[in-house]
Image (cartoon, coloured by chain):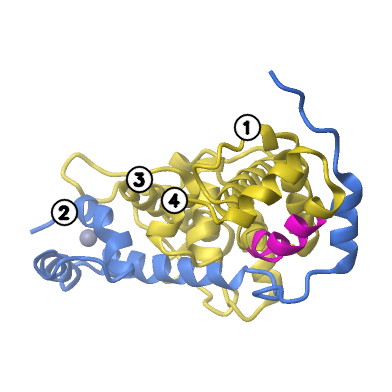
Chain colours: A blue, B yellow
Amino acid sequence: MLTCRELFEFLADYADGELEPAERERFEEHMAVCPHCVEYLDTYRKTIELAAASRQPQDSIPDDVPEDLIRAILASRGPKAGPD
Amino acid sequence: MQPIDEVVLIERLRAGDDAAYEAVVRQHVGAMLAVARRILGQDADAEDAVQEAFVQSFRKIDSFRGQSRLKTWLHRITVNVALMMLRSNRACPAVSIEEYLPQWLDDGHRASANLGWCDPGLVSVEKEETRAIVREMIDSLPDDYREVVVLRDVQQLDTKETAIVLGVGVAVVKTRLHRARAALRGLISTRFGGFAGC
Ligand SMILES: [Zn+2]
């Protein structure tokens, strides 16, 4: 049986659905008898959800790049580095 | 091999041709802004990153060897600038993540009970206040951990994309991500938690 510490190392892959079936079985065998790890997994998953939800609203693909930005880029073009 | 018109364009860029510069900006700015937004989120910061990336690209245009496409080269510069900005706009010193990871006994059991999250309502993704606190907590992680959480869990890149952006292996991304999530979980517990049954 995995210890709580060993199980901890598998958490990310378990939460991301990336454990091999045999590893997943060992993971779930421990979870069936350990309320501490069940609770930890629960709050670990909630943490991932909270991180995703912390993303600020934004447009995904900018089809229309602000013309102001383009003008600022054209204006801010500095001198080219000389040959070195 | 680069398409012939890209070779011509780069020659004109090196010669300081304004029209060529504008053509390159207009062609690539959208993709560069999308990449910067994935890393930095906020629009104003992302726009600053793109502007700085163009300044650097132009300054270094003579070192562009043409082994890669212009698009790839500009992408790499944008990612580097955005990561630098992510690192520099830290509001307060990073926490030490060890403090927020579980502590273990020699036999592999926990050294102390988990802090539970007693009031799930308090830790709700629906509340803007909670989301703002979580953003601050992510910002308080050390750079290596913060980057990986921002790319993987906030901006939702997959593990492989994250590894490419950060220039590290997939295994490194996974290890850092796990520790970063565990530390973030610990930070949230400290703020919102209490012992089970409280
Ligand atoms: Zn356990």
Closer to viewer: mark 4 or mark 1: 1
The amino acid beneath tag 3 is: Gly
Gap between marks 1 and 2 measured at Cα:
54 Å
| Residue identifier under label 3 | B169
Q: Amino acid at mark 4?
A: Ile
Q: Chain of mark 1?
A: B
Dot 4: element: helix
Chain for disc number 2: A
Q: Which residues are magenta?
A: B22-34
**Residue for badge 2:** A3
Q: Distance of mark 3 from mark 1, alpha carbons? A: 27 Å
Is residue B76 shown left or right of residue A13?
A: right
- Magenta segment's dominant SS is helix
* Closer mark to the observer between disc 1 and disc 2: 1
Count residues near mark 4 (Cα–Cα under 10 Å), then give few for <14, some for 14-19, many for 20+.
few
Disc 4 to disc 1: CB gap under 8 Å: no
Percent coordinates x, y for residue B52 in the rendering? 77, 45
Q: Residue B55 vs residue B153: left or right? A: right
Q: Could you say whether the residue bearing mark 3 is in a helix, strand or loop?
A: loop
Q: Residue at x 12, y 71 (%)?
A: A21
Label 2 crowd bin: few (<14), some (14–19), many (20+), radius 10 Å: some
Which amino acid does the dot numbered 2 rest on? Thr
**Is B19 colored magenta in this rendering?**
no
The residue sitting at 28% across, 71% down in the picture is A17
User: What residue does disc 1 label?
Assistant: B63
